[in-house]
Structures are given as structure tokens and as C-alpha cells.
Image (cartoon, rainbow, N blue to C red):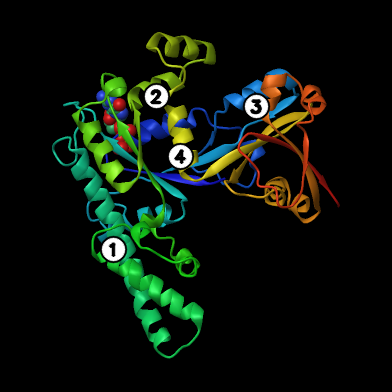
Amino acid sequence: PLNVGIVGLPNVGKSTIFSALTAIEAVAANYPFCTIEPNVGIVPVPDVRQDKIVALVKPNSIVPTVMEFVDIAGLVAGASKGEGLGNQFLANIRSTDATLHIVRCFEDNEIIHVAGKVDPISDIDVINTELMLADLDTVTRRHEKAQKLAKNSQDSKIKNEFSALTKLLEALNAGKPARTADLTEEEKPMVRDLHLITMKPTLYVANVDEAGLTDGNAHTAAVEKRAAEEGNEVVRICGALEAEISQLEPAERDEFLKDMGVTEPGLTRLIHAAYRMLGLITYFTSGVQEVRAWTIRKGTKAPGAAGVIHTDFERGFIKADAYNCEDLFRLGSEQAVKEKGLLRSEGKEYVVKDGDILFFKFNV
Ligand code: GDP
């Protein structure tokens, strides 16, 4: 599964939020290829549509789709120069697909803040500076090599690589994240293997106290303003409260949430925001044996979607029977969907939609 690295200064609530997330850990048996380490959690993506399908189809088994969260400890000022866990930290974060940046927006005199006071904008700057410095280091080294190569070459790949690196160097030297460098479609693939940290999408989590949850506070306002300037999203979470909720039995939990006047835990909003940030959508396979959710990137065509289940499905793809789950909910059964003529037969060029229910036909 795609994975999200959790970063933030010490004592902002990373481990609290990570533990709450992984309290709902998916059954790892369905994901035998994932190495499970203490700082890695495989988290089911809650989906009310899947619950509704299950209620109608009553399958023997239910498999949600999942996302991986990685708690990346050890980022402090100077990490790019090897301070704190330095290099280990950077190696861990390079292998993630996106970053979840947790920012402390709660006051609590009992809990020490590394900089002496709660100041989320300064915290964001410290973290982002370290990440940009790390990228700058990577890009500078590669740029030197590429410059030599490009001098004596007419190879378009080498030229594209060099121009991409030059743009990246400019952005990073100006104190801007790598993702702001305006790379062409030809340049982008040439630097993908650098796994630049500030190229990855970022989601901010404002960790607030209970009072700040609904209306926010001065700190969340500052974070929201900054995120808007960067074009990033913010999710407001009370880490301490999520930790409590995650320990409750499902029935108790629903009661608790009802008392608070909300329909879902903050973590659900967080997981969904991360899923969106990665450009992911869900389709379902549905039968009496199993109702299962599958993750694909937005824009994936039917054969690619089939390939998520098995590479043979992609190779031998013939067609997909398709309808959207909304039609199922409106009409009440697959039979009714068929009778209304809403079950379509889609070919290789069909772009799968969020919430589609698919049945693949393929050659073996
Ligand atoms: P990390 O160093 O970023 O992993 O931070 P931790 O998750 O260990 O949290 C540091 C301290 O802050 C712990 O004592 C937590 O119990 C506390 N903490 C975490 N989230 C909240 C919160 O939402 N409100 C309050 N008051 N304390 C919190």
C-alpha cells in the first residue's frame, strides 16, 4: 500500500496520533508482503459505502482497503547535518509517498516544547527547512555530476535531467520546496529516483486540545493561513482525545461520538484527507463470498484496476461489468441495477470511477 510518513518536532503528539491510528490496525494476514515494524502501521480506510454494500450483499468476508502510516521520529533542527537521528530519519522519510506534518496547536505547561513556547509557524519552518536542506544536499551532488555529463552529450535524457536539476536547485536555494519547481513532463521522470522529500505532497495536522476542536484557536488559524498559501490542506485533531476513542469498543465509541455531537472520529477525517492527497480512489468487488475495497490512482483505466487484484487479470483483461455503488443504494439490489440497464460492459479504455463496483472478465 501507499504510505504516509508522520513528521513533526518532538512532543507535538506524533506517537499519540500514530498509536491511535494503529489501534485500528488492519489484519496483516491480508497483506503478506508488508514487513511490519514497530513504527509502521497498516490502517484500514473507513468507507461508509463499503458498509452499505455489505448490508445489502451480506458477504462471508469483508476486506477494506488500507494505507500505511510510518512514524518517523527524530527530526530536530540540524537533522540534515546529522543532528538527532539525522541520517536514519532522512532515509526513512525518503521511502514514503507523502508527508503528514503534525504541528502542536495546544497549550499545556506540563508538556515541554522544544523551542520553549508553542509557535506552530516557527515549528513548521524548522521542519520544512531541514527537509529542504536535505533535498538541497541531494540535488547539489547530482547536479554536479549531471553538469559534466550534459556538457559533452546530445542525449535528450541527460539534457532533461540537467535542466530538471537546475530548476530544483533554484527552488531549493530560494527556500522553496522541490514541488514548486516547474518541471516539464519530460523532466519529471528524470529526477524521480532522487526521492526528494519536499517533492511529496504534504498534509498538516493541527493537534489541538478539546476546546480547539470545533472552533480552532489562534494557533490553528496561523497554520491554516500558512497551509492555504502553500496550497496544502489542514486537518484539526485532538490527539489525546483520539487516543482515548481508539481504546473504546465500537458500541461505546459510537455513543461517545454521539455525545460529542460528531459522526466520525477525527482520525477518519485524517485518513480520508491523506487518501485524497495521494490522488487515490476506491472501487469494489462484490459477491456473496467477499466484498472488498481496492485502491487505485485517479485516472486508472479498467485493465490497470484489474491489475491491482492480480497481474493476470490485467494481462488477460477482456472487459469489466460495471455499475456505481450509488445506483445500488438507490435501487436496492444488483438485480434491480441490471433491470434498469445500468450495468454496463466496459472495455480497455474505461476510466474507473470512485465507488464503481466491478466484475472483471479475463483470459488465463
Ligand atoms: P511526539 O514526541 O511528537 O511523538 O509526542 P507524543 O505523542 O509523545 O506527545 C507528547 C506529549 O504530549 C505526551 O505527554 C502526550 O500525552 C501529550 N499530547 C499529545 N497530544 C495531545 C493533545 O492533543 N493534548 C494534550 N494536552 N496533550 C497531548
Secondary structure type for disc 3: helix
Mark 2: C-beta under 8 Å from nearest atom of ligand 1: yes
Of the two numbered discs 2 and 1 in the rendering, the one whose residue sits closer to the viewer: 1
* Number of marks present in the image shown: 4
The residue type indicated by label 1 comes to: Leu
Residue 196 against residue 280 in the figure, above or below: below
138 left or right of 248 in image:
left
The residue that label 3 is drawn on is 326
Q: Are marks 1 and 3 in contact (CB under 8 Å)?
A: no
What residue sits 36% from the left and 75% below the top? Answer: 143
The residue type indicated by label 2 comes to: Ala
63 left or right of 250 in image:
right
The residue that label 2 is drawn on is 243
Secondary structure type for disc 4: helix
Residue 343 seen in this snapshot: yes
Mark 4 or mark 3: name the one nearer the start of the chain. Answer: 4
- The answer for how far apart the CA atoms under marks 4 and 3 are is 23 Å
What residue sits 31% from the left and 20% below the top? Answer: 214
Residue in front for this viewpoint, 130 or 295: 295
The residue that label 1 is drawn on is 172
- The answer for how far apart the CA atoms under marks 1 and 4 are is 25 Å
Mark 3: C-beta under 8 Å from nearest atom of ligand 1: no
